[in-house]
Image (cartoon, helix red, strand yellow):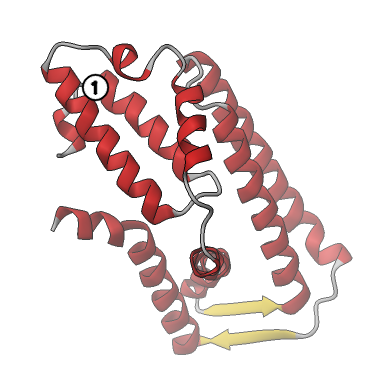
Amino acid sequence: MACNMLNARNETLLNEMKFYVRSSSVSDKKASEILMELEDHLLTAQQDGKSFEQVFGQNPKSYCDEIIRELPKPTKREQLGTYALLIPLLLLWRFIGGFSGELVIPLYETIAYMILSSALACGLLVALRKGAFMPKRQSVWITYVISLVTLAAYVGFFVFANRFLPVEPRLVLHGSYAYVTAAISLFIILFSLFGPLLKKKR
């Protein structure tokens, strides 16, 4: 049943549960099955006039932890699929710069960029999990701090990278080659972000 049939509060809390469970080291397929069952269960309870707390208790985080303990770990194939998607996406964000007509890809700077981005992504995930089910004010502060740290890290990287990392070797693309690379990269990024949503609507 569609999540938008839930009231605003139940939908928000359920989405937090989904994020918390999916961001754990569990099988995505099994997690999806369980979360769909929980959504149906919550919708039925809502129609019966029951609150979110009456269904999942006063501590939804503990409830999710119990679910996570029961779920199997992700298979090697699922893990490889996640990394295979994440690493190209981190790199493709840089390729969008080709829309300027010139795309310069220094080897060492690109490797350092991917290491930094991976570390920030892991840190972001951990921080968001810590902030799950917290009061709205605390969640806003956590998001604010994370945004500042991420921004500072990237600004610092691009300011100091050229000073400390070797410029060569590097790949330089001009004109149509740069535009085509940027366009393909942008298409892949948009498809990765919005493709799953389009599939669900169908």
Q: In the picture shown, does residue 190 fall above or below 102? A: above
| Position of residue 201 measured from the top left corner of the image (x, y, whole percent) | 16, 53
Choose top left, top right, bottom left or bottom right for residue 60. top left
Classify the position of the N terminus by image quarter. Answer: top left
Q: In the picture shown, does residue 91 fall above or below 68? A: below
Residue depicted at 42% across the width and 53% down the height: 28
Looking at this view, name the residue that lies furthest to the right: 164
Choose top left, top right, bottom left or bottom right for residue 200. bottom left
Residue that badge 1 annotates? 8
Return the residue nearer the eye: 146 or 67.
67
Residue depicted at 34% across the width and 48% down the height: 32
Residue depicted at 85% across the width and 75% down the height: 166
Question: Does 107 sit left or right of 197 as displayed?
Answer: right
| Position of residue 157 measured from the top left corner of the image (x, y, whole percent) | 75, 55
Q: Local crowd at mark 1 within 10 Å, few (<14), some, or many (≥20)?
A: few
**Callout 1 amino acid:** Ala
Question: Does 90 sit left or right of 11 as displayed?
Answer: right
